[in-house]
Every structure is written in structure tokens, then in C-alpha cells.
Image: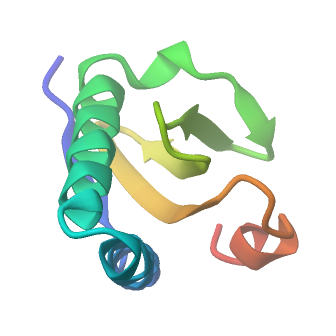
Amino acid sequence: MSWSLIVRSEAETDLSEAYAWYDSKSTGLGEEFLLRVEAAFDSIRYNPLMNSCIYKEARRKVLRRFPFCVFYTIHQTTIFILAVIHAKRNPQHWKGRI
């Protein structure tokens, strides 16, 4: 099955903020963060059902090396990335995006 992946604008904002924070800490760290996010997106696109539902129809993929999670939903053949946020952040922050 061919899955399309759409990153919602809120998740794009999450990514931009996290990238800027990591890049301000060490040159190149922001790029490493984005590479890990892209690897998570590829994994989700390859097998979106491998991560179980954690809230309503939302699923979570944990990033490697960085304490961030990708939250997403699946509708037919489309994957919607809802949020890319720090694992310690209040879950209410992303739950309203469903």
C-alpha cells in the first residue's frame, strides 16, 4: 500500500522551534535532529500501523537519540503528522490537534 504523509502546520512549527533550540546549543545538532525526524517519518510511512494508538486514533513514534515524539493519525491512505514535541511536554498540547 502506498501511504502519503502530510505534516500539519502546527507540527512544522514544532520542528522549527526544536531545530532552532538544538542548533543554538551546538552547530550541526539541529541538522542531526532533523535527520532523526526524517528517519521517524520514513519509518511511519513504511509501516504506520506498527505504533499503537495512545489517545483516540493518535499514534506515537519515539525519536532515537532525542527526547521527542512524533504524534500522528491515519485516515485511509494518508498519514497526518500532528505534532513533534518533547516527550516531557504536557500531552494536552497535542491532543487538541486531533
Residue visible at 58% across and 22% down?
51
Where is residue 65 drawn, in percent x and y? Answer: 47, 35
Where is residue 29 drawn, in percent x and y? Answer: 28, 59
Where is residue 74 drawn, in percent x and y? Answer: 46, 42
Is 26 above or below relative to 87? below
75 displayed left or right of 37: right
Name the quarter where the C terminus is drawn. bottom right
Residue visible at 30% across and 74% down?
23
Q: Quadrant of residue 12?
A: bottom left
33 displayed left or right of 14: left
Specify how the rendered protein is coloured.
rainbow
Residue visible at 49% across and 19% down?
49
Question: Which is nearer the eye, 59 or 25?
Answer: 25
Outermost left residue:
2
Is 26 above or below relative to 74? below
Where is residue 68 drawn, in percent x and y? Answer: 57, 51
Question: Which is nearer the eye, 30 or 57?
Answer: 30
Image label count: 0
2 displayed left or right of 73: left
Outermost front residue:
26
Residue visible at 46% across and 31% down?
64
Q: Quadrant of residue 90?
A: bottom right
Q: Quadrant of residue 61?
A: top right
Name the quarter where the N terminus is drawn. top left
